[in-house]
Image (cartoon, helix red, strand yellow):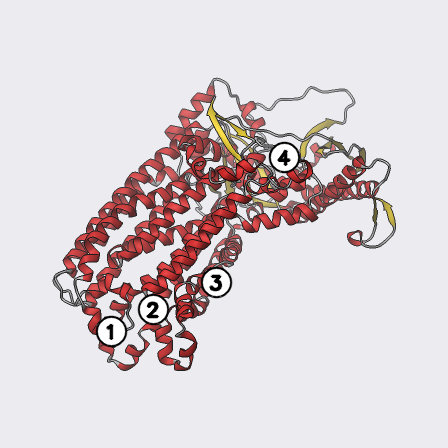
Amino acid sequence: MASLGDIGVSALINIISAFAFLLAFALLRIQPINDRVYFPKWYIAGKRTSPRSWGGVVGKFVNLNIMTYFTFLNWMPQALKMTESELITHAGLDSAVFLRIYTLGLKIFAPIAVVAILILIPVNVSDVTLSFLRRDLVVSDIDKLSISNVRPKSNLFFVHISMEYLFTFWVCFMLYKEYNRVASMRLKFLASQGRRPEQFTVLVRNVPHISGRSISDSIQTFFQRNHPDRYLTHQAVYNANKFARLVRQRQRLQNWLDYNQLKFERHPDKRPKTKSGCLGLWGKTVDAIEYYKDQIKYLDRKLTMERQKILKDPKSITPAAFVSFNSRWGAAVCAQTQQSKNPTLWLTNWAPEPRDVYWKNVTIPFVSLSIRKLVISVSVFALVFCYMIPIAFVQSLANLEGLERIAPFLRPVIERKFVKSFLQGFLPGLTLKLFLHFLPAILMVMSKVEGHVAISVLERRTAAKYYYFMLVNVFLGSIVAGTAFEQLHAFLHESATQIPRNIGVSIPMKATFFITYIMVDGWAGIASEILRLKPLVIFQLKNMFIVKTERDMENAMDPGGVDFPETLPSLQLYFLLGIVYMVITPILLPFVLIFFALAYFVYRHQVINVYHQKYETAAAFWPHVHGRIIASLLISQLLLLGLLSTKEAAKSTPLLVMLPVLTLSFHKYCKNRFEPAFRKYPLEEAMSKDMQDGATASDVDVKSYLEDAYLHPIFRSFEEVELVEVKVDTDPTPAKEASPSPSEPSSSSPLHDHHRGDEEEEASHTVQQYEFGQPHAAYQYEVEQHHHVYQYESGSQYQHEVESATNVHRYDESEPHYQYYHQ
């Protein structure tokens, strides 16, 4: 059991660690060599090109401007200058709402901490129960501040029950205000968006096989019949795993070609050489540029043949498709209604935005999803209980007194003062953090196996698994295992009737372990997040050994987005700890408050300067956050109810029975009132947006916008590739291009034309034209195969689209931070 001295040692270690991380960040961020690590978002947006350097060659790597070292802490106020509306424009609604979770924690726990410390702690200290139980139980001075110090049958429990009611009402009030605010922000954000593919598109799965018809024809016929005025186009989903492997291989070859061409440009008098063997390590020495060009040409032929094989093979088409409509209203009706009298066929859901699609899972047969989910559920259950072993080990470190009683030979080592303080005050939290380090990656693999088709859903499902894991293992497991280790002597030498009393007294005492965990994970851990030590080391290694071209540099500095699978569950655990212990052991609340304040500060800086979200869900994760805070309230109430029953508080305990009922009623009201805004798209809003677009948009315009929006990325590009496919009549006389009539919708792309019948296929050739945007490469060739001509053109264009924003961001190059003003 950690004492006040042990907590002090842990606090000192973690405060020094956090300060060291923040100081190291403040110094490393102003070094030119690290600029792409600490400000990658601005480079990706095209609003930052390179840091200003002083002092020639050395100045490109080290900041030689002495004055900047005196202002190295200016990043702190800079992180707070951007308003929330500017933040939404800059980083998206997901990031803005993510930061609001931290401010919600501050709003909830700051008043609760003040009231609890002023009222509950004096009430707990006024009693002396633990002084009489010290002979049987392992206790410390901190435990005297908890409810465990109140004697059984005491009237003081009425104070704790009153505070539980007061705190619950306050939490619910803040949750209601926040849910209302986030729902309004979501609807406003969706209404402010321009035309986007996912607004017009639904994902259709479990398309039935109809004899004599292709999947594409079945989809077109079904939706033309059931949505005659709204159906516009569709894109079938192909199983093209081999093609994807060839694309990745081509990307590697293209990268080597770019590298050697740049090398030749720098030294025109010397042609680069390579060996033709594996990895260029052995074999015949050849001209590198010509060698990689020939390899790419050969691979392009294979890609062409593989692509044609996929298009010709009916088995490569999966019973799923992205179906697009000519209006948002039509898509909303289709996505939110049952399409067939058989509820297992023609299943429709809103399509994720194109960037959010996890293409590997779109091709999974629908019938296998239930089996996959069952297998993963069993696997997660087994994993949770397998992790109970390391959790028990961590608790043995946290409870050395109990360990000494059953293993006296360890006492000479453990009793050394600093060793004991380190083991109890710092090591348990650090060990638990290390055990949990690889868990999110394992759970993400499990979620992918489950078959979810959107990256955002994969991350939310992984976050849910991680939260349940932390609830069972980190919270409940630590309490159960810790109680067993601490009170083992009492359990072995007292009657069974005394065990509930010992557990009831011991549960509040676990606050000391959670305090050490909060300091390790929530103080030092959050400070290390802003340092980005791992990405910094990886970037510098890649920059030295791997980066050869600008494309390599962009890949090396890619920061990714907020790590929702790990960050959200950890955040919800802090809500759980604060809510559970706000009445039982209120001394824990100041530690939680420090976490929320520091984390908000750090993540605001990261969202503005570092994280680059790959998708936008308009805060679709918020109902999960709200639900788990409600679950924390219920756990707190039930735990207090059980604790009072062990205290024989028969007079006061029944007063708590109504509190869980009221909490569940509040949750049901919020779910009915606000959650539909996160699950469905109101037809009123859809029609309003359609009417706004009605004056300018036509079916032809919408179709041209949508027909390739959900084309599989391997068909869309090799690297920077745009696919254009046209029909060529066998008649040498030029024919006018026929525009599709809105009243006669066709399939989404000429990719489906080969399914329309042998007569049409024999009457035309298909010309597949690929345009490659690859620097320093220009070649053309034609491959004639089965009366199809494939023309490849490689140029040197890269297209960069930068969205304009209300706020124009500018930089003071003397300092590596941004400044912005209103245009």
- The answer to whether residue 592 is above or below residue 806 is below
Query: Camera-side residue: 249 or 306?
Result: 249
- In what element is the residue under mark 1? loop
Label 3 sits on what residue type? Phe
Structural distance between the alpha carbons of marks 4 and 3: 45 Å
The numbered mark, 2 or 3, whose residue comes first in the sequence reads 2
| In-image side of 523 versus 670 (left or right) | right
Depth order, front residue of 73/353: 73
SS class of the residue under badge 2? loop
Local packing at callout 3 (Cα closer than 10 Å; few below 14, some 14-19, many 20+) is few
The residue at which mark 4 appears reads as 54
Q: Nearer the viewer, residue 52 or 572?
A: 52
* Callout 2 crowding tier (Cα within 10 Å): few <14, some 14–19, many ≥20: many
Instruction: Look at the image and tell me in which quarter the N terminus lies.
Output: bottom left
The residue singled out by tag 1 in the image is: 134
Residue assigned mark 2:
1
Which residue is more in the foreground, 761 or 796? 796
For the residues bearing labels 4 and 2, Cβ distance under 8 angstroms: no
The residue lying at 46 percent from left, 59 percent from top is 433
> In this rendering, which labeled residue sits more in front, label 2 or label 3?
2
